[in-house]
Image (cartoon, rainbow, N blue to C red):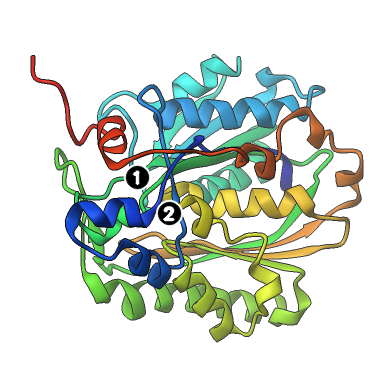
Amino acid sequence: MEVGIVSYGAYVPRYRIKPEEIGKIWGVDGKSMGKGLFINQKSVPSPDEDVVTIATEAARFMMARVPEVDPKDIGAIYVGSESHPYAVKPTSTIVAEAIEATPAMTAADMEFACKAGTAGIQACMGLVGSGMVKYGVAIGADTSQGAPGDALEYSASAGGAAYLIGTEKIIAKINKTLSFTTDTPDFWRREGQPYPLHGGRFTGEPAYFRHITSAAKMMFDAMGTKPEDYTYAVFHQPNGKFPTRVAAQLGFAPEQIELGLLTPEIGNTYSGAVPLGLANVLDHAKPGDRIFVTSYGSGAGSDSFDITVTDAIEDYQRDNAPVLEKIMQDPVYLDYATYAKYKGKIVMSE
């Protein structure tokens, strides 16, 4: 049975802050910091936006593009995030209610650092492919955290994307998925801590690069493919530097990753990073395009996907919801004080 993407939707908050605005508060050359990370600006959630609202907006856009799909036929919803607003209360049930998919369904929140969204896609593939459910929804969304003055503050941003997984009218067939996982603690946040800690340079070679390249090479071997067999490639993007480097190491050309590389303009959306990159590719994809996708989540693991765009995308009602290029237009720039207020770094005393 063929399983794949039936629809998708994406959302990124309108607010932005530039690295130089952050740097001047901490006595750092923010412009150079941004240049080193390949980040020009990052998205910032407004005070009334969180993972629930971002996931809901993305899911509603997803459903608007397939008006023929009855929400009651959705049998599973998984929301992957590092920043669920409740420690005990699922995000997924709120999203399910918002798109009228309740009550005959299963729902759960997922957490595996920045690959929780792609882990949700894999779970939905299993449920749909086994016949247990007709459709599954997988969402990756975050309002990611970075401690004041920490390097993460220059990149941690907000956004997310939702995917409807099914077997009918598939616009992008998922030919195969596989994963590479180890216990590599490069990044962590304990319960109750507001900001994560990270292993600095340790997050590069033994963590990000080892896992992505290993999963990618496993996929090449499994499918008998090489980089030039793909039209597009999307990699996890904690900054603009890492995915550019790993793509080159694997043999992908710059033009293959261009559409899927959003971090330079919106920052690191954590669980939303790869889902958003894939959404932007699908906004431009044509029948026959082949897409190589590999996510990464600290802790650590990578999920890899081999995807082929089908003829069904020609009749897909993409215009029923805004594409990412439109969503990202007309940003509103914040100063650091407003940014800190919106992110809850400063609060009024009672």
Dot 2 corresponds to which residue? 268
Measured along the vertical axis of the image, is residue 108 above or below residue 140?
above
Q: Specify the label residue 301 is tagged with.
A: none
Q: Nearer the viewer, residue 165 or 294?
A: 294
CA separation, marks 1 and 2?
Answer: 8 Å
Q: Are marks 1 and 2 in contact (CB under 8 Å)?
A: yes
Where is residue 39 drawn, in percent x and y? Answer: 45, 61
Measured along the vertical axis of the image, is residue 347 above or below residue 288?
above
Where is residue 82 drawn, in percent x and y? Answer: 34, 44
Would residue 64 be found to the left or right of residue 209 on screen? right
Quadrant in which residue 85 is drawn = top left
Q: What is the crowding at mark 2: few (fewer than 14 residues within 10 Å), some, or many (at least 20)?
A: many
Where is residue 240 drawn, in percent x and y? Answer: 48, 66
Q: What is the crowding at mark 1: few (fewer than 14 residues within 10 Å), some, or many (at least 20)?
A: many
* Circle 1 SS class: loop
Q: Nearer the viewer, residue 285 or 47?
A: 47
* Circle 2 SS class: loop
Would residue 271 be found to the left or right of residue 203 on screen? right
Would residue 89 be found to the left or right of residue 168 on screen? left
Quadrant in which residue 337 is drawn = top left
Res 2 seen here: no
Tag 1: amino acid: Ser
Name the quadrant of the C terminus. Answer: top left
Res 312 seen here: yes
Measured along the vertical axis of the image, is residue 80 above or below residue 295?
above
- What residue sits 46% from the left and 67% below the top? 38
Q: Specify the label residue 144 is tagged with.
A: 1
Where is residue 61 drawn, in percent x and y? Answer: 66, 29
Tag 2: amino acid: Asn
- What residue sits 68% from the left and 45% below the top? 325
Residue farthest to the left? Answer: 350
- What residue sits 43% from the left and 54% below the top? 268
